[in-house]
């Protein structure tokens, strides 16, 4: 005896090996044996032979007219497959005919609703029409999707994709037919989504692709400031005391946000006074104002070669920036320094000063360097002041225990992009210019952090221990810098953390209640958000610098380049902040100079393929 049964929603046939009333042991045509519940059995039959039964049943089912059967059953109550088969065939149905009817009824759930074991009910007309319309819609969508796939495989961009490019690239809705088509085409071509769309001409600029990806995540509303929330500057510098010092800033050639400046003034009884002057936008950016909320969302100025997205709008920056030949409000930290460069006293002022000059790295470097300091060449503007600041910086470096830090071979890189032409220049870390600026900023941030802590005023601190940098509301040592505490306060136009700390410092200096307490949600939320966002901005900057390094290689038409082995097969290019894995690199010691062949550059993937040519002679 054979049976026609259902298992996991699929009709099957098999021969009975054992009948245990509630269950049966069944052997399928291919020999597999299984235990089937009696409730799953629809038919028992002897003929036709088991191997032919399903073929004949399917052939009969294919000839049945589902629309006709639905019309016939539309007025009926629920019915069994056997009853409908008897009506349709006009005789007591053969097992294979009943099986055919079951296959049709079960295969057309739009027309017939299952009501129980082998029993069905014709779908109501309105439900059927809606279901048929849905099926047709799905069919048309699938047809459209298939056409999209054909176009994409041929590297043609479907017209409807143009308005959806950003979402398809950066935040796709994976239920849309456009995404499904794109995914299928990627599988067919072996390309990633960006590479396939690039082949279709949808990404004409790799730079814009990377930039727009960043904007899509961090600036979905765009980078411009809403004019409705750009408040006029509220502070009035005329109410602040005016101090006469010869202050100057030191920045690279592209800087427009001058956050800091320095002054050196001789003291009547020996020694001198160093002024560290910081722009003070906290006077005009009121807490929880629309402008403050924007700054709290942006959290930092975003830097990338040839471009930046500022934290504050231009009118605020232009008002508070320490530009030359203008009187600007500042928060000043003054250091009384003895002739042996020991700090004897410090004090703060909120005041206005005139910035005498904005010195630029590229113009200052040939005049102010180790050679001119060694030969005591002081025939340039601010030479005496710069030399005193350098000597003071050397003393501070020694006090921090960082005098022996090996920075001779450490290099920073500057990028200049003009009309899509990139220039990459090196600046040695630890040069006199670098040392003066960094040591004075470290002193100010450490000293102001100390003052906030001693006054029990909340501040946001950066600390480093066991190699990890973290931010907290409690002062802790920064082992990397060798200071007891460190609170970023020197760039309030560029970093929201500095703006918060500056508000607290204003309260300290003016003797007014601080804006934030350690229990304030605002300072805790800002600190946590800043830490995550600042890291993301830095990662974006590194990615764009890598992009421009690759562009520079293309721009210079280089097919070969020199590099130095960092570890294993990782090589750093000479004169570029660019590293690459070189699988063909032999086992060479770190620091070995090598020659590489550049075989492929991919600006979308920001990847580089290079092969080892040989070792360079020492």
Image (tube, rainbow, N blue to C red):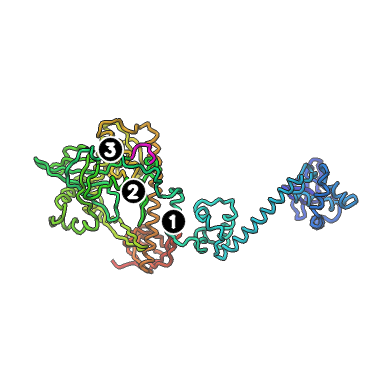
Q: Position of residue 525 (x, y in %)?
A: 40, 37
- Residue located at (40% from left, 64% from top): 585
N-terminal label among 1 and 3: 1
Q: How many marks?
A: 3
Considering depth in this image, is 421 or 434 the residue closer to the camera? 421
Label 2 sits on a secondary structure element that is helix
Task: Look at the image and give the residue range highlighted in magenta.
Answer: 285-290
Q: Position of residue 426 (x, y in %)?
A: 29, 59
Main secondary structure found in the magenta portion: loop
Q: Is residue 348 left or right of residue 286?
A: left
Mark 1 highlights which residue?
210
Distance in Å between CA atoms under marks 2 and 1? 25 Å
Q: Which residue is mark 2?
A: 314
288 in the magenta segment: yes
- For the residue labelled by badge 1, is the local secondary structure a helix, a strand or a loop? helix
Magenta run includes residue 501: no
**How far from the left and from the top, in percent, is residue 121?**
79, 44
Q: Residue 98 location, x and y as percent? A: 84, 50
Whether residue 572 appears in this view of the structure is yes
């Amino acid at each position: 005896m054979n049976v026609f049964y259902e298992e996991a929603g699929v009709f099957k046939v098999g021969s009975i090996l054992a009948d245990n009333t509630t269950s049966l042991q069944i052997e399928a045509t291919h020999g597999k044996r299984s235990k089937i519940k009696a409730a799953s059995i629809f038919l028992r039959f002897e003929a036709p032979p088991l191997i032919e039964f399903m073929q004949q049943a399917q052939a009969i089912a294919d000839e049945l007219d589902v629309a006709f059967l639905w019309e016939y059953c539309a007025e009926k109550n629920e019915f069994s497959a056997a009853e409908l088969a008897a009506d349709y065939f006009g005789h007591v149905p053969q097992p294979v005919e009943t099986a055919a009817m079951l296959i049709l009824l079960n295969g057309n759930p739009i027309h017939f609703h299952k009501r129980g074991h082998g029993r069905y009910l014709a779908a109501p007309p309105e439900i059927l029409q809606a279901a048929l319309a849905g099926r047709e819609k799905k069919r048309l969508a699938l047809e459209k999707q298939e056409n999209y796939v054909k176009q994409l495989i041929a590297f043609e961009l479907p017209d409807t994709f143009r308005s959806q490019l950003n979402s398809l690239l950066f935040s796709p809705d994976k239920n849309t037919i456009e995404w499904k088509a794109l995914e299928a085409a990627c599988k067919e071509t072996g390309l990633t989504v960006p590479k396939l769309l690039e082949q279709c001409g949808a990404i004409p600029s790799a730079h814009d692709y990377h930039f727009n990806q960043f904007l899509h995540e961090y600036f979905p509303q765009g980078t411009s400031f809403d004019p409705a929330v750009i408040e006029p500057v509220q502070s009035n510098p005329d109410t602040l005391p005016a101090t006469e010092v010869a202050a100057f800033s030191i920045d690279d050639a592209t800087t427009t946000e001058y956050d800091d400046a320095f002054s050196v003034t001789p003291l009547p009884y020996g020694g001198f006074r160093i002024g560290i002057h910081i722009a003070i936008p906290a006077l005009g950016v009121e807490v929880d104002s629309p402008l403050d909320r924007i700054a709290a969302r942006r959290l930092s100025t975003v830097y990338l070669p040839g471009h930046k997205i500022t934290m504050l709008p231009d009118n605020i920056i232009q008002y508070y920036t320490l530009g030359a030949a203008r009187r600007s409000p500042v928060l000043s930290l003054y250091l009384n320094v003895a002739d042996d460069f020991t700090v004897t006293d410090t004090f703060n002022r909120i005041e206005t000063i005139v910035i005498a000059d904005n010195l630029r790295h590229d113009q200052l470097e040939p005049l102010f360097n180790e050679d001119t300091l060694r030969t005591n060449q002081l025939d340039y503007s601010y030479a005496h002041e710069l030399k005193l600041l350098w000597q003071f910086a050397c003393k501070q470096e020694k006090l921090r225990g960082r005098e022996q830090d090996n920075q001779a071979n450490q290099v920073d890189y500057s990028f200049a992009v003009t009309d899509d032409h990139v220039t990459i220049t090196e600046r040695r870390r630890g040069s006199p210019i670098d040392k003066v600026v960094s040591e004075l900023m470290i002193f100010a941030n450490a000293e102001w952090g100390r003052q906030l802590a001693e006054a029990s005023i909340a501040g946001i601190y950066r600390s480093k221990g066991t190699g990890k940098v973290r931010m907290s509301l409690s002062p802790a040592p920064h082992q990397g810098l060798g200071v007891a505490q460190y609170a970023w306060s020197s760039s309030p136009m560029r970093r929201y953390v500095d703006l918060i700390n500056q508000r607290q410092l204003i309260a300290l200096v003016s003797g007014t209640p601080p804006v934030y307490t350690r229990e304030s949600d605002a300072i805790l939320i800002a600190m946590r958000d800043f830490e995550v966002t600042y890291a993301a901005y830095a990662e974006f900057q590194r990615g764009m610098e890598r992009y421009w390094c690759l562009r520079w290689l293309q721009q210079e038409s280089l097919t070969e380049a020199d590099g130095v082995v960092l570890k294993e097969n990782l090589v750093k290019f000479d004169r570029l902040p660019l590293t690459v894995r070189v699988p063909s690199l032999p086992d060479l010691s770190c620091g070995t100079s090598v020659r590489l062949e550049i075989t492929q550059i991919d600006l979308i993937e920001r990847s580089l393929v290079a092969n080892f040519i040989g070792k360079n002679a020492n």
